[in-house]
Image (cartoon, rainbow, N blue to C red):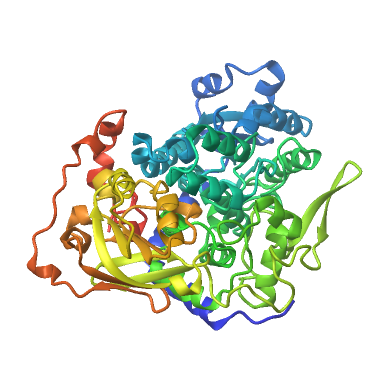
Amino acid sequence: MSTELHSVVRRVTDRILERSRAVREDYLARMQAQAEQGKHRASLSCGNLAHAVAACGPEQKQRILDLTSANVAIVSAYNDMLSAHQPYAGYPEQLKRVLAKQGHSAQVAGGVPAMCDGVTQGQPGMDMSLFSRDVIAQATALSLSHNTFDATLLLGICDKIAPGQLIGALSFGHLPTAFVPAGPMATGISNDEKVKVRQQYAAGEVGKEALLEMECNAYHSPGTCTFYGTANTNQLVFEAMGLMLPGSAFVHPHSALRRALTEHAALRLAGQIQGSGHYRSLAEVVDEKGLVNGLIALLASGGSTNHTLHMVAVARAAGLVLSWDDFSDLSEVVPLLARVYPNGPADINAFQQAGGVPLLLHKLAERGLLHRDATPMFGRLEDYFRQPMLAGEQLAWQAVPETRDPAVIPPQDTVFSVSGGLRVLDGNLGRGVIKVSAVAPEHQLITAPAALFSSQHAVERAYQNGELNRDVIVVVHHNGPGANGMPELHKLMPILGNIQKAGFKVALVTDGRLSGASGKIPAAIHITPEAAKGGPLGRLRDGDIITLDATSGRLFTEAALDQRSPLQPDLTGEQSGLGRELFALFRRQVSSAETGASIFYQE
């Protein structure tokens, strides 16, 4: 494959490298200094080592004390409430057994918290969701701080969890590091049926019993939720960046193929430690080329808008400075090559059957949209164009010559849309992002009067009182990271969907989030500067005419905002209680959405 790299991809990559030069050099120097210390266990005192192996059996103890073997850190997000993470229960013992057969060892270095956004949607816990990413990053770094390890396996999938683990692992970027996926649950009811019942419930047409039955049929077994939200976007993007075995993201839990992939990942990583002939560090993999490959896969698949936060924060952890302009410019030339709900009716299992990540990456490479010389953790990037299979009991990889479902991944030389799924919006209301891949063209330009709210619960009450049966742009202000933690506002989607279904023009503008499940309603989200820090959304008033134009990337009002005082709603009830008061430092210190909404890397 000799297709020349697209000029825009090259230009964006070059400017990321140029603007990052100083911080990237500093990061690489720190990682080199860590690598030059050699096998860190060798520098520990006898007392240190005794503590590190005290709980081990005799054979494992001997392997860890033998400095010629690999000791692999396992950082797990296991709990048995999250369907996506429940399959990880037996992974540590499985990994230890397969490594022991080759003379290596593994230890559970630590666990990280793993909250489920599906459980906390519309609840007070959602106000802590985004900040959990930084807590997970800290917990991952603490887990690795014993310095007894030669490589790292990350067991994490969902929402803020996998990005947080990667950010933390990058502090130990001299270690070979890989994610070990667990895979999606089997397909339940259709996504169309799910949306239908939710909208019926919001309109009062069905009761809670019918809604609960539908939801339990949708989310019904171990594995990742099957829609293309943040969890599955993590998996697709990180596979595209070479952070897991080729084709491993969406293989079902508990299958023979999944077991083989899990064991193979551990063995391959143990063979790539420092001192081997195949040493490859995490810092080498997460460079500007790997990062851009991940962005392109994100755009081509219509992935989660949460990654306009996560990828910026991940990049900065690796000494790379990423901006929303990079997303926007790439989106202009990266076509949409996947239709997975909410970008279409199919789920992630249908995407996998159609050819999955390997076929998507192959199609992007054919168009000159990937850095084919990027360095993945395993092999070469071309290896990521092949899908895993079992030949008897042997793991092998095979080519995916063409799509098996043209409604999910388009046939050769065709696309679902000529541009990617995300756009950046600018104007006198601030700067934000919109996911356009699921929004019909006739809904991408909306001009309507504003209706202002400071919470999604207030919007729900207004809808139930019949106040929103009109053309309206719903503005939910003071929902940014510095105000209340930047909760996802998915409670609004059935409501706004019903308004649209009734024939009215409707859109959402907010400094809050919507994540990967945002669908057919035009939604300008992550608006920065946020209202709590003087942003213009706080100067809007009910009835102000707003224009949201996703085609030209404009978000503005004709109202004289500079002549008004900012709104100052009482947020006390959303900043304390149920643990939210413990995140006051995060709210005070967090950077803007555009710079990753992190406490680590300030503007």
Q: Position of residue 464 (x, y in %)?
A: 33, 46
Q: Quadrant of residue 284?
A: bottom right
Q: Position of residue 74 (x, y in %)?
A: 59, 34
Asked whether 442 or 34 is in front, the reply is 442
**Residue drawn where x is 42% and y is 36% of the image:** 120
Q: Position of residue 56 (x, y in %)?
A: 63, 18
Q: As drawn, is 402 to the left or to the right of 573?
A: right
Is residue 257 at least partly visible in the picture? yes
**Residue drawn where x is 18% and y is 62% of the image:** 540
**Residue drawn where x is 33% and y is 52% of the image:** 512
Q: Quadrant of residue 59?
A: top right
- In this view, 155 is above or below 548: above
Which quadrant would the N terminus be assigned to in this image? bottom right
Q: As drawn, is 226 to the left or to the right of 9?
A: right
Asked whether 492 or 70 is in front, the reply is 492
Q: Position of residue 69 (x, y in %)?
A: 69, 35
Asked whether 49 or 377 is in front, the reply is 377
Q: As drawn, is 212 to the left or to the right of 487?
A: right
- In this view, 266 is above or below 53: below
Which quadrant would the C terminus be assigned to in this image? bottom left
Q: How many labels sit on residues?
A: 0
Is residue 281 at least partly visible in the picture? no
Asked whether 281 or 356 is in front, the reply is 356
